[in-house]
Amino acid sequence: MPIILNTLKTKIENKTAQIAVVGLGYVGLPVACMLAQTGYTVKGVDIDQTRVEKINKGISPIEGIEPGLGELVAEVSESGRLQAYTSTDVLNSVNVVLVSVQTPIEDHDHKPRYKHLQTALEAIAHAIQPGTLVIIESTLAPGTMYNIVMPELEKQSQLIVGKDLFIGHCPERVTPGKLLHNLRTMSRVVGGYTPQIAEVMATLYGQYVQGDLDTTDILTAEIVKTGENAYRDVQIAFANELALICESLGGDFWKVRNLINKVPGRQVLFAGGGVGGHCIPKDPWLLIANASHDARLIPTARQVNRAMPEHIATLTASALESYDITPETAKIAVLGYAYMENSDDDRDTPTAALLQLLNADEIRVHDPFVPDYQGDLEAIINGVDAVILMVKHDVYVAQNWQQILNKMQHPIIIDARHVIADDFGVGNATIRVVGRG
Ligand code: SAJ
């Protein structure tokens, strides 16, 4: 191992290494806090002045229920172990830089948009000293480290990767609502430019990660992260397609699913109203972005999942029509705006797509976690012609659905998440469950 790298490893081991985290969002901030709590002096950098000020006051800028994060931000800010800045000039005195900036995809061609990453790389390259380790934690299209990150850093810093500049890719595996828990417990793929660099990276992550630290090469790390989420998207698409087949045959996906899953090696996931969130809809496109292979399954799975809100809108329209309710008079309540149950996160939520497709005189939206939609559930449901259940929040599962039906103008429920128990006495109500013909 080069002496300069060995020196860095020693600094990491005795916690004298100065660490920086660029990007203090739902990944960067918990990472910065965990490293500070572990005993490092951490400089956090973010372009958002308000976010920086909040953190330096010991306040977490992240909304939603994140167990332990608020207290941890206060603790490490108070102790001075974490200080936040808007300027990347502070990077001229650090030994390790972690980068957690967003890597979205373009809507029109699904190609990655690396504006934030490139801005960060340019600023980092101009500030860092020889011997610095730069680790990208953002999710990347395979090939990005070699084709964009490495050339950008070398060109702007005049340093040479492997000689006086070290790079690696360690993609994050966080989920909103359990950021700190996942950061501590999930195994990590630690991709180093060289095995020695991967070893030094693992020394750092080993300070707070209890899961496995699987050291490997950079390309493998890029493919694993995007692949694990593309895999999930395809699994969900299979469940959705099987549900549509069941509906068309007059079958019941929920019964079929349970019986298939009794077979060893089968695990059909849940059909639903669509796939939202910050990673599953995006990562499949990152996986195939630079691949010369003409991927067909993965884009098709994306199409299947993106079409589910339209299916829910169709089920709704046909149910209203069966009661001779026209769009001009229809009143609909949509329950659930977040992209997943018991979360306030509404990034890429299927409900937003559904709302674009519904045709009604009045549409009321409710969500117990999303500030814009936290109205009184009973008042929202009162007098509507149809209720659409888009998210399986616990509060909806716990409802007395007979009482709800009694308050509605017409007894129509479109259940996109199998919220209502199978033993519910439907009576004369019309309850259309996704996957049930
Ligand atoms: N969904 C379905 N059917 C399913 C599962 C999910 O329709 O069977 C929908 C959800 O309603 C949601 C979307 O897909 O709209 C995504 O749900 P998710 O459970 O995959 O949750 P995410 O998006 O937070 O995924 C994250 C990912 N974790 C990371 O990227 C680090 C994913 O790899 C994890 O598998 C997932 O959390 C998890 O299992 O918690």
Image (cartoon, rainbow, N blue to C red):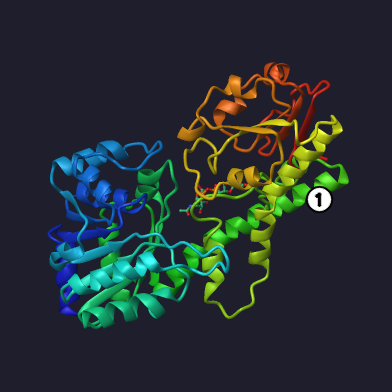
Q: Left or right: where does residue 221 sit relative to residue 48? A: right
Camera-side residue of 26 and 354:
354
Residue 67 seen by the camera = yes
Left or right of residue 360: residue 12: left
Quadrant for the N terminus, please.
bottom left
On-image quarter of the C terminus: top right
Q: Which residue is mark 1?
A: 245
Relative to 400, residue 164 above or below: below
Q: Is residue 161 in view from this perspective?
A: no
Q: Tell me where residue 280 sits by quadrant.
A: bottom right
User: Residue 294 appears in which quarter of the rendering?
Assistant: bottom right
Write the residue at 71% across / 50% down.
Answer: 240
Amino acid marked by disc 1: Ile
Rendered residue at 19%/56% (across/down):
43
Percent coordinates x, y for residue 224 in the rendering: 49, 65
Residue at 17% over, 66% down: 95
Percent of width and height locating residue 392: 60, 35
